[in-house]
Amino acid sequence: MARLLKSQLDTLHQIITVDELMNTGSRYEKPAISPQDTAFLQYTSGSTGSPKGVVLTHANLLANIRAMGERVGANPNDVFVSWLPLYHDMGLIGAWLGSLYYAALFVVMSPLAFLARPQRWLQAIHRYQGTLSAAPNFAYELCLHRLEDSDLEGIDLSSWRAAFNGAEAVSPETVIQFPQRFRPYGFHPNAMMPVYGLAENSVGLAFPPLDQGVLIDNIQRNANPLC
C-alpha cells in the first residue's frame, strides 16, 4: 500500500519494510530529539468539522500529561486500568503515556474484551486495585444496562478514585445513575469525573477538581426574546 501511495506523493522518497530493516545489519543511531520536534500527528475525530491532522511536539505532550497529572494527583502508586484503543488520544496519551510518565502500573486489555463482556473492565479494576480509569459515556452506559447483579458478585471498586468520562457527549443521566448503581460495590460518587479534551490540546483540556462530584447546569437553549 505504501508503494502505491508513493506515486501519489512527491515528498515520499523511500519505502522501507520491517524485513528490510532486519536484514541490513546496521547499527541503530539514536537521533537528537528536541522538545519542539514532532512526536506524531494526531487526527481529530471530525465530530465538529472536517477531520484534520494536528502536529504534536514532545513539549506539547509533556505539558499536557503534566497538567492532567497535576489535576488528578497522579503518582507512582496509581494503577491505570484501560481497555481504550492505543490509537485513540485518550488511550494513547492519557492512559499509556501518562502512566509511563508517572511510573504508574498500566493494566491494559483489548477493547473487544470489554465490548464482549463489560464486567471485565470492572473485574480488572477490582483485581489490580485500579485507581484511575477512563472511558467514553457509552461504556458507563453498557455497565449500567447490560450487567446483572450476578455479574458483579465479589467486585470491590473502592480503590477507583477517578473515573474519567469523556471522548464523547457526557450524559447527565449516566453520571448520576452510575455512582448510584455501583455505590454498593464501593464506588465513591465523587470519583465520577466528566472531562473534555480535543486533539488541538494534545488531549485533556477541562478536568473538574478532585472529589468535587458531578455538577449539572440546566440551560435554556432557546431563550425568549427580550421585550
Image (cartoon, rainbow, N blue to C red):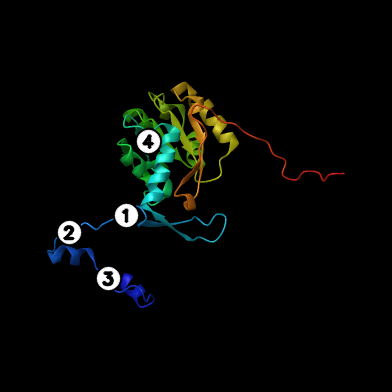
Percent position of residue 76, x then y: 31, 32
Please name the amino acid that badge 2 sits on: Tyr
Q: Do residues under tags 2 and 1 come within 8 Å of each other at their CB atoms?
A: no
Percent position of residue 185, x then y: 44, 23
Q: Do residues under tags 4 and 3 come within 8 Å of each other at their CB atoms?
A: no
- Nearest the viewer among 181 and 194 is 194
The label nearer to you, 2 versus 4, is 2
Percent position of residue 208, x then y: 52, 34
Answer with mark 3 or mark 2, whichever residue precedes in sequence.
3
Helix, strand or loop under label 1: loop
Answer with mark 2 or mark 1, whichever residue precedes in sequence.
2
Q: Which residue is mark 3?
A: 15
Q: What residue is drawn where x is 51% and y is 26%?
A: 189
Looking at the image, is 6 positioned above or below residue 139?
Answer: below
Q: Report, in whole angstroms, how far the alpha carbon at label 4 lies from the one at label 3.
A: 41 Å
The label nearer to you, 2 versus 1, is 1
Q: Report, in whole angstroms, how far the alpha carbon at label 3 lies from the one at label 2.
A: 18 Å
Q: What label does residue 86 carry, if any?
A: none
Q: What residue is drawn where x is 17% and y is 59%?
A: 28
Q: Which residue is mark 4?
A: 120
Please name the amino acid that badge 4 sits on: Arg
Query: In terms of image quadrants, where is residue 37?
Result: bottom left
Helix, strand or loop under label 2: loop
Helix, strand or loop under label 4: helix
Q: What residue is drawn where x is 38% and y is 33%?
A: 74
State whether residue 108 appears in this view: no
Answer with mark 1 or mark 4, whichever residue precedes in sequence.
1
